[in-house]
Amino acid sequence: MSFQMLDRHVRIACQDAGWAGIVRANYAALLAPDCARAPDLDFVISGQADSRQHTLWQHGRGSLVESRASLLLFRLEKAVTVGLQKLRPDLFFFHAAALTHGGQAFLLVGESGHGKSTTAWGLLHHGFDYLSDELGPIELPTLQVHPYAHALCMKRLPPPGYGLPPSGAIDLGETLHVPLSAMPARAADPCKLGAVIFVRYDRTLPSPRWREVGAAEASARLYAQALNALAHPGRGVDAVVDVAQRVPCYALDTADLGASCELLRDRVSGWESQARRAASTRQVA
């Protein structure tokens, strides 16, 4: 199977029909069946999806063996994203989910296990559209966020009201993967970054907490989640500081998913209303 990922050709061959179905669903929105040029990244998966031995081979990198399908898919995802970072050093990659609303992109940034993907899944039920999960590629001069619409991955079932679709989700036991075709949203086009939101789940909170984050704190927190900082001048520090200074940054401590998503949606809607009023005032003047 051939895929177009960030304008690069990725080929993934599967020797088992079960694995072919998993890979096709995981990257369905990025399929490029008519791509004739040589692949920039080339992989082969062997072993049956329901077995206890799976092998991932990458051209030029050798092979590795995993005992669980969820782990092999994780290894494939990481190999693809690392490869894309090397192929697109012009982009700055953050460990973040990326959504859009009102023509602007929003990065949900945070450490693994802190609720980025679950919050992203919730926001897709509140009028947001989908750019990416786990990978936020930014074009620094324009602050355009590029789409990487692979399946959204969660480590646990979402709460009631935000359940998985009755069909289409991939359950690998330890991880749940929701392809774009099963999302309550559409794939978004590249658009300019509107804000960065640092997400952290805290089950003890009675309600979500929201605060503005200054450029200094935002720079430190963004740098901790930068994936290819060393590919950029000054080890990427200047680039991260530039993003933190040009874009408003906030911290959202999430509790109840519904309340957290409604808070963020209302904030974003408020910004959009202010922008429309400002634009109307300028036109009248």
Image (spheres, grey):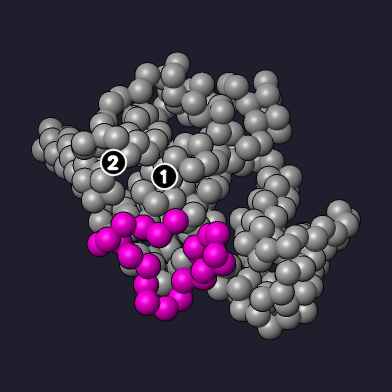
State the SS at label 2: loop
- Identify the residue shown where x is 26% and y is 34%: 205
Q: Which amino acid does label 2 sit on?
A: Ala
Residue depicted at x 66% and y 58%: 71
The residue tagged 2 is 255
Question: Is 272 in front, or is 159?
Answer: 159
The answer to whether residue 233 shows anywhere in this view is: yes
Residue hosting label 1: 115
Residue at disc 1, secondary structure: loop
Instruction: Give the residue at the far bottom of this rendering.
Output: 17
In the picture, the disc for residue 102 is none
1 or 2: tag closer to the N-terminus: 1
Q: Are marks 1 and 2 in contact (CB under 8 Å)?
A: no
Quarter-wise, where is residue 41 in the image?
A: bottom right
Q: Is residue 206 left or right of residue 240?
A: left
Residue stretch rendered in magenta on the structure: 156-177
Tell me residue 27's x, y (percent): 58, 67
Q: Which amino acid, mark 1?
A: Gly
Q: Which residue lies furthest to the top in this view?
A: 216
Residue at 66% x, 76% y is 50
Residue at image position (44%, 40%) is 114
* Residue 282, magenta (yes or no): no
Left or right: 154 with respect to 183? right
Q: In front here: 184 or 186?
A: 184
